[in-house]
Amino acid sequence: MSEPYIYESPDGGKTVTRRKFGSTVKEIIQTADEVVEELFSNEPAMTTLSEAQIDTTFNSIRKSLNDVHLRANWTQDYTMSKHVSKAETLLEQLEADIRVASDSAKLALSESKHEFDDEFGDIQALQEELDK
């Protein structure tokens, strides 16, 4: 049987260390840079969602919350109604944040494409030239 380890993160999750139970000698398991590299394989950590995807997802969540809210009001469960109202407010804030992040990602991708085109020319024209 292997010895038990204690896992710690001295910097709030950026670096993970472990040490044997009773020992003060720590070894680094993974740094923040390694986590990012593993998760994204050096790819940009952004994605773009279509407006339809955002609308569909949030409309579904909104409908579910509305159903719960109606049930809470019908059964006069005021505590549940209060919690659902708070969840609805948080959902609105989350939706606004996601829309801003999605728009920012789209803008960044567009600017990257323009920078690429400015430096290397239109990729399609370049491919056609190579095919000749």
Image: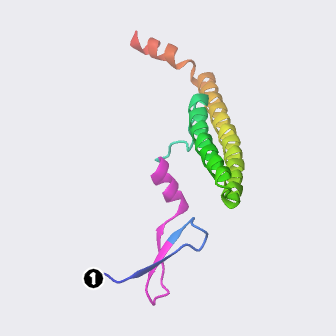
**Residue at 67% from the left image edge and 34% from the top image edge:** 103
According to the picture, the residue beneath numbered tag 1 turns out to be: 1
Element type at marker 1? Answer: loop
**Colouring used for the render:** rainbow
- In the picture, measured across the screen, residue 18 lies left or right of residue 88, that is left
Q: Which residues are magenta?
A: 17-40
Return the residue found at the far front. 75
Is residue 38 rendered magenta in the image? yes
Return the residue found at the far bottom. 22
Up-down: is 62 above or below 90?
above
| Residue 76 point in image, percent of width and height | 68, 56
| Residue 92 point in image, percent of width and height | 70, 44
Give the crowd class for mark 1: few <14, some 14-19, many >=20 residues within 10 Å. Answer: few
Q: Amino acid at mark 1?
A: Met
Q: Quadrant of the N terminus?
A: bottom left
| Residue 67 point in image, percent of width and height | 60, 44
**Residue at 61% from the left image edge and 36% from the top image edge:** 59
| Residue 70 point in image, percent of width and height | 65, 46
Is residue 18 rendered magenta in the image? yes
In this view of the protein, which residue sits in the foreground, 16 or 115? 16
In this view of the protein, which residue sits in the foreground, 126 or 49? 49
**Residue at 64% from the left image edge and 44% from the top image edge:** 66
Tell me the quarter of the picture where residue 130 sits.
top left
Q: Quadrant of the C terminus?
A: top left
